[in-house]
């Protein structure tokens, strides 16, 4: 059914302004300290009172019980180029684990988007980022397009995804494209790759980094991963 987008109503605009003003004020007060949502864990909750232009805001943590199920089914937003991508026979493992570091002046969690071919254990993507599921989704999409560590575009036959939120975002798209998709919280191969020597990230647990430091570390990590896939010949092989 075709529909024409409508303009935002004044009451809706006031509510948006109310929420944005409160979020900014919470940030200025140092009480805006969100963490990734996990079902059964506590989540940051803001309470907003008073004037929309100068609201009173307080924060506490409340139990997050997950998103209520809805009867409305949204159609997946499939990128236009995906139906034309080559079909691969591989099974890919996809993870979105946290990296144990902090960035100076930035409280956001640092994570890595990991995409690995199960049969060969070839690392197709190892992108560190500070975003959430939307940024992780885009990183996986770029791997499908062949813009990851391995320049080979294509859709796998099957995808096994460790992160529940990323699975929820990917599954409708992959299913619509005929790719089998399932969720598995612990994937042994991904855990084993993550347990490789700490020099893989060139970072120390609990370290405080500047943005320039983490960019340099990400570059070093990318180079290291590239060497894992394409090792240099030994002196005997060269001679």
Image (tube, grey):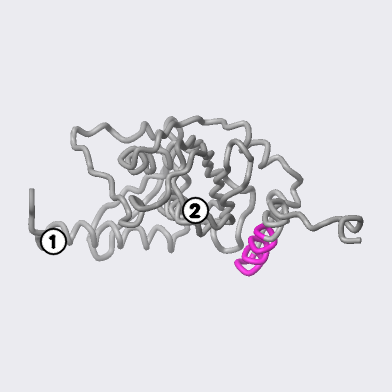
| Label 2 secondary element | helix
Q: Residue at x 21, y 38 (%)?
A: 73
Question: Residue 17 shows which numbered tag?
Answer: none
Where residue 31 appears, as percent x and y from the top left, is 45, 54
Q: Is residue 139 above or below residue 193?
A: below
Q: Is residue 209 left or right of residue 2?
A: right
Where residue 103 appears, as percent x and y from the top left, is 60, 60
Q: Is residue 3 left or right of residue 18?
A: left
Whether 216 is among the magenta residues is yes
- Res 104 quadrant in image: bottom right
Which one is earlier in the sequence, the residue at label 1 or at label 2? 1
Q: Which residue is mark 2?
A: 143
Q: What is the quadrant of the C terminus in the image?
A: bottom right
Where residue 109 appears, as percent x and y from the top left, is 54, 51
Q: Is residue 217 visible?
A: yes
Q: Nearer the viewer, residue 70 or 3?
A: 3
What secondary structure do most residues of the magenta stretch adopt?
helix
Q: Residue at x 51, y 59 (%)?
A: 147
Q: Residue at x 24, y 56 (%)?
A: 50
In three-dimensional space, the C-alpha distance between marks 1 and 2, rounded to whole angstroms, equals 37 Å
Whether 218 is among the magenta residues is yes
How many C-alpha atoms fall within 10 Å of the one at disc 1: few (<14), some, or many (≥20)?
A: few
Question: In this picture, which residue range is highlighted in magenta?
Answer: 210-222
Where residue 145 appears, as percent x and y from the top left, is 45, 56
Q: Which residue is mark 1?
A: 8
Numbered disc in front, either 1 or 2: 2
Q: Is residue 21 left or right of residue 110?
A: left
Q: How many marks?
A: 2
How many C-alpha atoms fall within 10 Å of the one at disc 2: few (<14), some, or many (≥20)?
A: many
| Label 1 secondary element | loop
């Amino acid at each position: 059914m075709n529909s024409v987008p409508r303009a935002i109503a004044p009451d809706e605009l006031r509510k948006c302004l109310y929420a944005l003003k409160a979020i900014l004020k919470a940030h200025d007060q140092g009480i805006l300290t969100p963490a990734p949502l996990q079902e059964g864990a506590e989540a940051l909750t803001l309470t907003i009172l008073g004037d929309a232009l100068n609201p009173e805001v307080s924060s506490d943590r409340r139990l997050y019980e997950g998103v209520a199920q809805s009867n409305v089914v949204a159609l997946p937003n499939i990128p236009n180029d995906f139906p034309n991508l080559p079909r691969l026979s591989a099974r890919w493992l996809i993870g979105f684990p946290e990296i144990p570091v902090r960035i100076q002046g930035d409280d956001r969690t640092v994570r890595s988007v990991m995409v690995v071919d199960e049969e060969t254990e070839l690392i197709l993507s190892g992108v560190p980022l500070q975003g959430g599921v939307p940024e992780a989704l885009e990183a996986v999409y770029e791997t499908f397009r062949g813009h990851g560590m391995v320049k080979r575009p294509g859709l796998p036959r099957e995808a096994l995804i460790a992160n529940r939120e990323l699975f929820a975002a990917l599954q409708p798209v992959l299913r619509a494209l005929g790719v089998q998709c399932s969720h598995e919280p612990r994937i042994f191969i991904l855990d084993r790759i993550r347990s490789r020597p700490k020099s893989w990230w060139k970072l120390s647990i609990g370290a405080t980094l500047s943005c320039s430091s983490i960019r340099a570390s990400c570059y070093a990590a990318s180079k290291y991963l590239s060497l894992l896939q394409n090792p240099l010949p030994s002196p005997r092989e060269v001679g």
